């Protein structure tokens, strides 16, 4: 599995969440299989998003799409976006 890991800061989480939920990147149409939204417990303005894909190519294409969104309408709700494509090489669930 390949994940696009995104990190950025938000000034207003609720406003950002409305934009995220409107899905300007067309997550399903772009091949996202699952996603997770996280916030740092000690920095509430730091948002992390994991978008999971079947292929590295789909993850890279979404990264490219996000660069366009961040350069345009995304500037109204986010600060200092960064992203990278990572590959899951091991996972375990411990009870």
Image (spheres, rainbow, N blue to C red):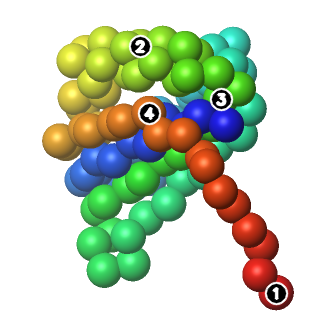
Secondary-structure class at tag 4: strand
The span from disc 3 to disc 1 (Cα, nearest Å) is: 26 Å
The reply to whether dot 2 and dot 1 touch (C-beta < 8 Å) is: no
Q: Which residue is mark 1?
A: 95
**Can residue 25 be seen by looking at this rendering?**
no
Report if the CB atoms under discs 3 and 1 are less than 8 Å apart: no
Q: Earlier in the sequence, mark 3 or mark 2?
A: 3
- Seen in the picture, residue 52 relative to 64 is either above or below; the reply is below
Mark 2 vs 1, N-terminal side: 2
Which numbered disc flags the more N-terminal residue, 3 or 4?
Answer: 3
Alpha-carbon neighbours of circle 2 within 10 Å: few (<14), some, or many (≥20)?
A: some
Residue 85: percent from the left, percent from the top? 44, 33
Category of crowding for the residue at label 1, using alpha-carbon neighbours closer than 10 angstroms: few (below 14), some (14–19), many (at least 20)? few
Name the quarter where the N terminus is drawn.
top right
Residue at 33% x, 36% y is 83
Q: Position of residue 75 (x, y in %)?
A: 22, 29
Report, in whole angstroms, how far the alpha carbon at label 4 lies from the one at label 2. Answer: 13 Å
User: Which residue is denoted by mark 2 in the rendering?
Assistant: 65
- Assess whether mark 2 and mark 3 are in contact (beta carbons under 8 angstroms): no
Answer yes or no: is residue 72 visible. Answer: yes
Residue to which mark 3 is pinned = 53
Against 39, residue 65 (above or below) is above
Query: Are discs 4 and 1 less than 8 Å apart at CB?
Result: no
Left/right placement of residue 44 relative to residue 94 reads left
Please tell me which of labels 3 and 1 falls first in the chain: 3
Q: Residue at x 61, y 49 (%)?
A: 89
Mark 4, residue position = 85
Image spot of residue 47 (x, y percent): 38, 55
Q: Quadrant of residue 93?
A: bottom right
Secondary structure state at the residue bearing disc 1: loop
**Considering only vertical position in the picture, is 20 above or below 69?**
below
Q: Which mark is residue 37?
A: none
């Amino acid at each position: 599995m390949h994940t696009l890991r995104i990190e950025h800061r938000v000034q207003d989480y609720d406003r950002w969440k409305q934009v995220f939920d409107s899905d300007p990147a067309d997550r399903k149409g772009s091949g996202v299989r699952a996603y997770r939204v996280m916030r740092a417990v000690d920095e509430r303005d730091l948002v992390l998003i994991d978008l999971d894909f079947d292929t590295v190519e789909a993850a890279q294409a979404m990264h490219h799409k996000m660069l366009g969104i961040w350069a345009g309408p995304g500037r109204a709700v986010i600060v200092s976006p960064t992203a990278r494509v990572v590959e899951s090489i091991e996972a375990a669930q411990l009870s």
